Amino acid sequence: MPIDHTTAARAAGHAHHKHKHKKKRVWRDKHFRWVDNGDGTVTKRAYWARHPQRPPASHKRGPGLRPLPKPQHPPAPASPAKFGVYSGPFGRLQATRLLNRAGFGPAPGQAEALAAKGLRAAVHSLTRPSGSAVLSGPAPVDADGVAIAPADAYGHDHLWWLDRMVRSNQPLVERMALVLHDWFATSNDGVSQQQQMIDQSDLFRRSCFGSFLDLLKGVTVDPAMLQWLDGAENTRRSPNENYSREMMELFTLGADRGAYTEDDIREQARALTGWRNSYSDELGAYNFRYDPNRHDSGNKTVFGRTGAWGWEDACRLCVENPHHASYFIGKLWSYFVPTPPSASTLASLTGIYKSGAYAIRPVLESILMHPDFYRGEPMVKPPVVYLAGLLRSLGRGIDTEDWIWLSQQMGQQLFYPPNVAGWDDTRWLDTSTLRARWNVVTYALDGHDFDAWDDTYATVETVNEALNSALGAWGWPALRAEQQNELISFANRVASRIVADWQQGPYRALRQNALRQLIAVSPDMQLQ
């Protein structure tokens, strides 16, 4: 049979081709590495590695020792911007600032979850809560485990509100209640029952996103305020100007702005007459009510407008005063951004406020989404915001009465503002109050520190491991380079002094306690 040389050659070539391109087996193996996220955190991430042969069981797949997060190098604060919506990155750092200023700092994982929503949805999740607040975690108790008595025991009203700051799932409601407590500053020093002050704070919670006019009406006839500024002593026969004056100067119009005169204050006081209350040694002041016989029903001229004005008219006249809207915007803005708004921003926010029937929520949302909120200068945390943030980071509830006197030392006991003008935000830090903040951190770390002498602490912890452990205890705060470098230097100095065998564990435990203390009192933890 004749041989077909062409077919044979093709077959031989095909076989050679298959042999030449035969794929070698490659082993795919999951490895892990550390990735710096640029926001004060380092994440372990998986990737697939390829090996020409099956790796042995002893093959190292990472990720090795955790590196320290890269320190922050924040840009210089920007000048006040025109009105608009922030368009920069909205990640963990920006979400943390939002939670610090519109709440009491993030609980573990909360900043990351908020950042994932995006700016607008994140802000709306705070300004548009649904239903009643949910308090998660153990109820507040004293050091003996006894439930607090906020209406009866001295300082327990402070603990009651601090607990809400720590546990509530509606942090902006609590923060706005604190803002309004400062705005309409009222103190237990002039109120007969602690419960009346608690009730006033509930009024702030209910009203914090609604109409400022409705809020002003509620505050004007609130039992705590009627006592604090003598509204229940204001009668047609003996007008009292206390509330009328502060209503204009502090609450709605501002001093030295040409918004009102002394005659306006006197006439407004007449409009506000008519409220009274009963009193007993057992109950204090109670049964607050309007009595027409105590009201001056004659004509009054306020801001050039004449009529037989009553207390509701007095509120409306203040809010309708041409100077009110700009005052309201400037004051609300100052609680969230430390530098005054640009002319463009002031004009736009004023327009939003007026066109929205004096609603607070639209203005607040615009502030929380404004470029100045994220690119502007930092602010010092008020004392109770600082304390609540520490407890939230640690996952610790209210379990001691020590927070009462410690908050006093820091300069802010709730329900005891220093005067009718509220607290002075420019004086939060001095040599005395900074020492108090140090003490607060020491007490907060009780139960979150280490016994240096129980022989349980690691004897081989490196400097990086020590600092990572301390940062993790506080939820990985993002530190600037100068602060992180100083902590590293301190940790190295301690390491150089660990010589004897008996020092290995105890000195490392003491170093860990010190690092946790130093991180919490560092500038980056004091700022929001």
Image (cartoon, rainbow, N blue to C red):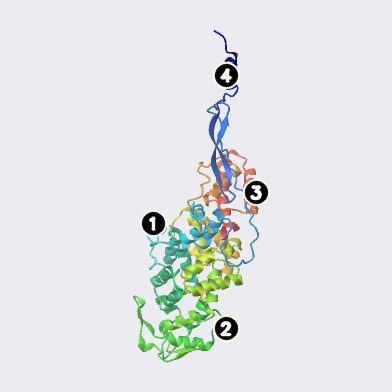
Q: Residues within 10 Å of mark 3 (few under 14, many from 20)?
A: few
- The quadrant in which residue 163 appears is bottom left
- The quadrant in which residue 54 appears is top right
Q: Position of residue 440 (x, y in %)?
A: 52, 59
Which type of secondary structure does the marked residue at label 2 adopt? loop
At 64% from the left and 54% from the top, the residue drawn is: 73
Q: Position of residue 361 (x, y in %)?
A: 47, 68
Q: Which residue is mark 4?
A: 15
> The residue under label 1 is which amino acid type?
Gly
Residue 375 seen from this side = yes
Among the two numbered marks 3 and 2 on one chain, the one whose residue lies closer to the N terminus? 2
Among the two numbered marks 2 and 1 on one chain, the one whose residue lies closer to the N terminus? 1
Q: Closer to the observer: label 2 or label 1?
A: 2
Among the two numbered marks 4 and 1 on one chain, the one whose residue lies closer to the N terminus? 4
Among the two numbered marks 2 and 4 on one chain, the one whose residue lies closer to the N terminus? 4
Q: Which residue is mark 3?
A: 489
Q: Which residue is mark 1?
A: 145
> The residue under label 3 is which amino acid type?
Ser
For the N terminus, give its image quadrant: top right
> The residue under label 2 is which amino acid type?
Gly
At 45% from the left and 64% from the top, the residue drawn is: 174
Name the one closer to the observer, 187 or 455: 187
Residue 469 vs 158, above or below: the answer is above
Residue 402 seen from this side = no
Q: Residues within 10 Å of mark 2 (few under 14, many from 20)?
A: few
Among the two numbered marks 4 and 3 on one chain, the one whose residue lies closer to the N terminus? 4
Residue 461 is marked as none
Which type of secondary structure does the marked residue at label 1 adopt? loop
Q: Which residue is mark 2?
A: 258
